[in-house]
Image (cartoon, helix red, strand yellow):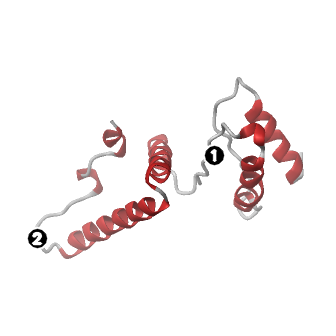
Amino acid sequence: MNINNDELINIVTDYLLEDRYTQAILIDGKWGTGKTFFVKEKLIPTLKDNTSLKFAKIYYLSLYDIKDLTELTNKIYLALFENFFKNKFGKNITNKLNLFSKAINIGLNALNNSNILGFNITKDDLPKFEDLID
């Protein structure tokens, strides 16, 4: 069954307005069919403009390269964490946290590849994200 963008937006809006539903929505389809464009450029802006949905928190997460439920859970927590800091301290702090995270990752990779200090740190040596949430 093929439906157009407006019909899909109406279906998602009706779903979100239904009190008994409080779960995520998954839009599935073949690669290259425009799912990301639809969600980012059509669906999310329409939902954010809908005054009946002002209570809704909208997070876009790609499932690309997600291998298991733990990775998905970590990605969800990270999105919530970033949103919290953005709302609390502004977008600037989120950009700094992302830059800091990337710098640590680059530094660890450089240490591991050069073995300068005679030790090898892997991601398994670092605390898991869910351990940091508390």
For mark 2, give the secondary structure.
loop
First of labels 1, 2 by sequence position: 1
User: Which corner quadrant holds the C terminus?
Assistant: top left
For mark 1, give the secondary structure.
loop
Q: Residues within 10 Å of mark 2 (few under 14, many from 20)?
A: few
The residue nearer to you, when weighing 54 against 25, is 54
Residue type highlighted by circle 1: Ile
Q: Specify whether 33 is left or right of 6.
A: left
Residue 117 badge:
2
User: Which corner quadrant holds the N terminus?
Assistant: top right
Tell me the distance, in whole angstroms, between the alpha carbons under discs 1 and 2.
44 Å
Most distant residue in the front direction: 89
Q: Quadrant of residue 108?
A: bottom left
Front position among marks 1 and 2? 1
Position of residue 9 measured from the top left corner of the image (x, y, whole percent): 82, 46
The residue nearer to you, when weighing 109 against 45, is 45
Position of residue 107 measured from the top left corner of the image (x, y, whole percent): 26, 70
Position of residue 23 measured from the top left corner of the image (x, y, whole percent): 63, 33
Q: Quadrant of residue 37?
A: bottom right
Most distant residue in the top direction: 20
Residue type highlighted by circle 2: Leu
Q: Residue shown at 29%/55% (left/top)?
A: 123
